[in-house]
C-alpha cells in the first residue's frame, strides 16, 4: 500500500494527497513510511509563510498570489492552519469558500489543516504536510496562519520566508508589534490599500524598520492591485537569499530542528519503556500528598532508571 | 537570597510574588530552588480555569466572582494568560483596567501572564505560577485564558475545574462547540443575560448536554446578577468532587503530568550532552542535500549514542 501511495504522491495525485493529509491530522503512524520514501524526491518547493490578524484579508492576498503564480505557470499548494479552538469562528471556512476558483485547477492544492490529534504538536504535522506537497511537485507552498500562540510562531519558522499582512487601520498598533515583526517577517504587506491611510501606514512602517532589510508594499487584494509586484518582490527575495547563502542556512536550521525533534520523540519512547509504573505512581502519590516536591521526585526516578 | 524569597512568598508578600512571576516569564533557572522549597507548603488552593471567546465578558465575570469571594473572606489570585501574539489587541489590557478596584486589596493578587521566553511551554510556566500563589496563601486561584490553541487547552487542564463563559449571541454556534465543551467544561455560564435570548441559550445548552453532569447558569456580570449563585455552584461542585474522589484523581493526574514533564526535560538535557556536534551536523547536511530522510538519520544517531 505504501508503494502505491508513494507513486501517486510523486505523480501529484490529488486524492492520495488528501488522504495522507487526513492521516497526518489524525497522527496516524502509517504516514512515516510514506514520508521516508518521498523525502529524497522533495526539496524544490518555495515555502512562503503568510500570517496576519483576522480581518486583514490574508486569505484574499493568498488567493490572488495563487492566481498570479498560476499565470506564471507555477503549481501552488496552500495549507491554511486552523488554531485548535473551542469556539468556532466561521472565518476560516468563509475564507476557504472564496478560494473556490482554484478548486477546479489541478495545479493548485488547497487544504485547511486542523491538527488537534497529531502527535508532536501542530508544527510537526505542518512540516509533514509541506514535505508531501513538495514531493507532489508543488513549486510554491503557502502556509497560512493567524499570528497568535506559540504554535503559530513555530509554524512561521517552517517557511523559507514570511509575509505579514497588515491593514491601514492598524496605525498606532504597529509600534507595539515592532519586535514581533522584526523577529519573523521578510515582507510587510499593507493590504486594503483602497482604504484611507494606506500610504501613511507604509511610511510609518518604513520609518519604524529603517534599520531592517524589509520589503514593505501596499496591496488591495480584493481589487487585485499590487499583487503582481508582491510576487515579483517575493521572487527577488528568493533569488537574493539563494545567492547570499541565507536560504542554505535556513534550510540547514530546518533540517536540524526536524532531526532533533525526531530524536526527542525517540527518547520519550525509550523513557516510557524504562520507567516502571509502580515506581512512577509511588512518586506521584508522594507529590500529591506534598511529602516531596516534583523536582526531587524527578531526580529520584532519574537515578533509578540510570538516566 | 532563595531563603529570603521563600519566607516572603510564604508570608504572601506581593512584591516577592511579582518578581518571581517575572522570573518565571523569563524562564529564569533561579525559580526552581524557590519552587522546591515552597512546594510542601502549597496544595490548599482551589484552582478554577475560566475560558471563553473574546467579547464574552469573562474578565468581568472573574472580577465579580473575586468580589464575591472577598465578601466570603477568601483570598484570591488571578492569572490572566495572554496568548503569545504578534498582534496586540488591546483587549487584555482593557480588561485588566476594569479590575483595578482589586489592586488596592491585599487579599487579591492579579497578574497578566505573558510567557514568550519561558522554557517548557506556556503551561509549564502557568503551573509554576499556580504553585507560588498557592504557597502564598491564595485560597481561590482563577486562571483566565481564551479558548484558542493547544496551549490554552493545556492550561485549562491545570485547573481543578473549568468554567466556560458563553453569551446569548452564540446561539447556533454552540452545537459546533459540543465536543470541545464536553471535554473541558464543568460549569457553563451564559453571561450577558441582560441581552435577549439568554433563556433560550440556557435551554439549548441544557438539551445539548442532557447526558452530561454540567451546571449551566446565566449571569449578567456587568450588572452583578447571578454571580453569588455561580460562586455557590462552584463551591458545591468542589465539595461534591472532594467527596466522590474526583478531585483526588484530578490531583494525581496533575502531579503525574508535572513529574513526567520534568523527566522529559532531564532526558532532553542528557540527550544534548550525548550527541556530539560533528555527528549531528554531518547528518543535518545529508538531510539538507536530500541524500537521507530525517527518520533514517535519527535512527543512525540514536544507534551511535546508544539510546
Image (cartoon, coloured by chain):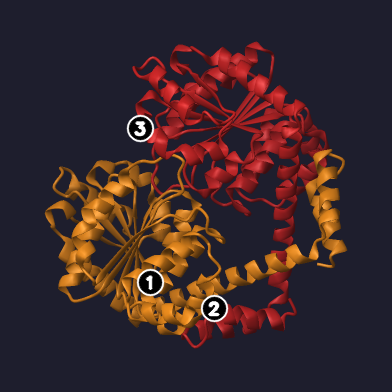
Chain colours: A red, B orange
Q: Which residue is mark 3?
A: A172
Which residue is located at x 20 percent, y 47 percent?
Answer: B200
Q: Chain letter of disc 1?
A: B
Which element carries disc 2, helix, strand or loop? helix
Which residue sits furthest bottom?
A: A291
Looking at the rendered structure, which numbered label has been put on residue B227? Answer: none
Left or right of A20 in this view: A223: left
Which residue is located at x 39 percent, y 30 percent?
Answer: A55
The spot of residue B128 in percent (x, y) is 46, 69
Is there a contact, CB below 8 Å, between mark 2 and mark 3? no
Which element carries disc 1, helix, strand or loop? helix
Between A263 and A170, the residue placed more toward the observer is A170
Looking at the image, tell me whether mark 2 or mark 3 is earlier in sequence order. Answer: 3
Left or right of B75 in this view: A126: right
Q: Which residue is mark 2?
A: A294
The spot of residue A186 in percent (x, y) is 58, 30
Is there a contact, CB below 8 Å, between mark 1 and mark 3? no
The spot of residue B155 in percent (x, y) is 44, 60
Q: Which residue is mark 1?
A: B16
Does mark 3 fall on the same chain as mark 2? yes
Q: Image quadrant of residue A273?
A: bottom right
Is there a contact, CB below 8 Å, between mark 2 and mark 1? no
Q: Image quadrant of residue B298?
A: bottom right
The C terminus of chain B is located in which quarter? bottom right
Which element carries disc 3, helix, strand or loop? loop
Classed neighbour count for the residue bearing mark 1: other residues with Cα under 10 Å, few (<14), some (14–19), many (≥20): some
Q: Chain letter of disc 3?
A: A
Amino acid at each position: 500500500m505504501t508503494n502505491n501511495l508513494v507513486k501517486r504522491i510523486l505523480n501529484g495525485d490529488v486524492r492520495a494527497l488528501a488522504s495522507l493529509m487526513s492521516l497526518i491530522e489524525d497522527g496516524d503512524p502509517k504516514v512515516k513510511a510514506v514520508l521516508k520514501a518521498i523525502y529524497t524526491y522533495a526539496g524544490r518547493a518555495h515555502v512562503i509563510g503568510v500570517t496576519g490578524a483576522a480581518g486583514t484579508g490574508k486569505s484574499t492576498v493568498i488567493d490572488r498570489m495563487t492566481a498570479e503564480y498560476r499565470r506564471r505557470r507555477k503549481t501552488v499548494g496552500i495549507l491554511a492552519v486552523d488554531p485548535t479552538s473551542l469556539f468556532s469562528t466561521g472565518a476560516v471556512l468563509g475564507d476557504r469558500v472564496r478560494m473556490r476558483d482554484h478548486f477546479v485547477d489541478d495545479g493548485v492544492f488547497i487544504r485547511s489543516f486542523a491538527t488537534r490529534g497529531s502527535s508532536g504538536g501542530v508544527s510537526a504535522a505542518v512540516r509533514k504536510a509541506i514535505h508531501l506537497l513538495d514531493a507532489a511537485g508543488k513549486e510554491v507552498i503557502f502556509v497560512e496562519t493567524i499570528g497568535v500562540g506559540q504554535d503559530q510562531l513555530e509554524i512561521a519558522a517552517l517557511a523559507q520566508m514570511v509575509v505579514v499582512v497588515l491593514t491601514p487601520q492598524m496605525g498606532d498598533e504597529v509600534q507595539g508589534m515592532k519586535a514581533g515583526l522584526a523577529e519573523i517577517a521578510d515582507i510587510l504587506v499593507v493590504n486594503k490599500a483602497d482604504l484611507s491611510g494606506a500610504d501613511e501606514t507604509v511610511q510609518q512602517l518604513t520609518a519604524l524598520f529603517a534599520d531592517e532589510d524589509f520589503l514593505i508594499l501596499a496591496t488591495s487584494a480584493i481589487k487585485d492591485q499590487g499583487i503582481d509586484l508582491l510576487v515579483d518582490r517575493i521572487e527577488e527575495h528568493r533569488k537574493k537569499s539563494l545567492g547570499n547563502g541565507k536560504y542554505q542556512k535556513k534550510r540547514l536550521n530546518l533540517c536540524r530542528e526536524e532531526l532533533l525533534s525526531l530524536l526527542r520523540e525517540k527518547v520519550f519512547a525509550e523513557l516510557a519503556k524504562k520507567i516502571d509504573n509502580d515506581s512512577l505512581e509511588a512518586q506521584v502519590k508522594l507529590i500529591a500528598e506534598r511529602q516531596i516536591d516534583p523536582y526531587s521526585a524527578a531526580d529520584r526516578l532519574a537515578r533509578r532508571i540510570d538516566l
